[in-house]
Amino acid sequence: MKPHFYKVNTHPQESYTAYHLKSRNFGSIWHYHPELELHYTIKGQGMRFIGDNVSAFQSGEVILLGENLPHSWQCQKEYYDDDPQASVEAAVVQFLPDCMGRELCSLSEAYLLPRLFEKAKMGMVIHGRAGEELRELMLSAVHATGMQRLIVLLQMLEVLATTEEYEHITSAYAFYRTDEIETMQLRDIYNYTLMHFREDISLEDVAAIRNLTVTSFCRYFKMMTNKSYYDFLIEVRISHACRLLVEDRKPAEALCYECGFRNVSNFYRHFKRVTGMTPLEYKRCFTACGKGSLPPGISKGSRSR
């Protein structure tokens, strides 16, 4: 499936779009648009597909997408079912590079903006203090009017252009390597994993989806995603574990079995490797951060590049 072109609807009297989204889910269409997009996930969990990268997403994540970078946020299964408790929430800001005039980037004071727009082509996950500032500014942009809208946008651009608290998401333009058939086949593998991650998934099972030998499948998946299938499966399981931890459903020793792990020590080892914390530390960090945003974890430590 090729990414779909999406027309961003900007009001004729506004230079950029900013809105607060509340919905059952984020949809599932892989799409792109010429506008850069700043996306703050206020509430929701699942997997995000950006360029050639697939990773877990969770509440609190702030991402900047460059021009025409294909992307899709796919929530966990219950968000598409009839679970009344399942819903998502996000703040989204979309803007063209020249939305405040083509002359802006040529000004001496704005020399960092062209560099920022170039970095954004690979996608950026924003962490730390910069992420905190952007969350506040994005919510302000949603409600701002008149000149204040331009001021808030410039403030967001300043944070993005000067911060070192970020990491790239995709390899350079790697998503252009895939064709329609390959993308559909890869999506089948992702969907199968999201449906069966609680079970024992063998490489033979997923290799059969593409009618490949295990060796050929492992080589194919690594080439397409820059990570092993095993690493991807662990990320999915840890993402689900993070959600169960903050919902306080069960102690870590019990919930590990709901996430597809077969022993506690193995679960603890992978949880620490992926999130940089133990389950108890993660839960305490969530409590300290407040329920408005989850502590940074999977998005920061999950990529195997």
Image (cartoon, rainbow, N blue to C red):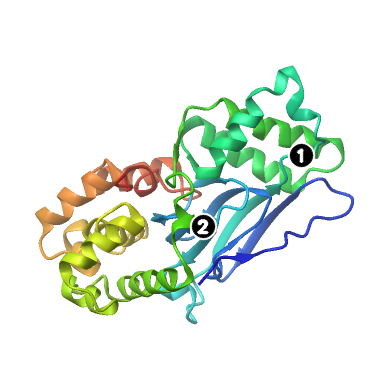
Q: Visible in this render: residue 208?
A: yes
In the displayed structure, 146 sits above or below 4; it is above
Q: Visible in this render: residue 233?
A: no
Element on which disc 1 rests: loop
Task: Give the number of the disc on residue 98.
Answer: 1
| Quadrant containing the C terminus in the rendered view | top left
Q: Residues within 10 Å of mark 2 (few under 14, many from 20)?
A: many
Check disc 1 and give the amino acid type: Asp
Element on which disc 2 rests: strand
Q: What residue is shown at x 85% (from left), y 35% (from top)?
A: 147
Q: What residue is shown at x 29% (from left), y 45% (from top)?
A: 275
Marker count (numbered)? 2
Q: Which residue is mark 2?
A: 43
Q: Position of residue 225 (x, y in %)?
A: 35, 56
Which residue appears farthest toward the top when viewing the image? 108
User: Relative to the observer, which residue lies in front, 285 or 23?
Assistant: 23
Side (left or right) of 16 relative to 267: right
Q: Position of residue 62 (x, y in %)?
A: 52, 45
Which residue appears farthest toward the right when viewing the image? 13
Q: Earlier in the sequence, mark 1 or mark 2?
A: 2
Side (left or right) of 150 relative to 298: right
What's the distance in space between the residues labelled 1 and 2, CA to CA?
31 Å
Q: Residues within 10 Å of mark 1 (few under 14, many from 20)?
A: few
Q: Position of residue 48 (x, y in %)?
A: 45, 59
Q: What residue is shown at x 32% (from left), y 62% (from top)?
A: 240
Choose mark 1 or mark 2, whichever is in front. 1
Q: What residue is shown at x 16% (from left), y 59% (from top)?
A: 253
The quarter of the displayed image where residue 56 is located: bottom left
User: Relative to the observer, which residue lies in front, 32 or 291?
Assistant: 32
In the displayed structure, 219 sits above or below 140; it is below
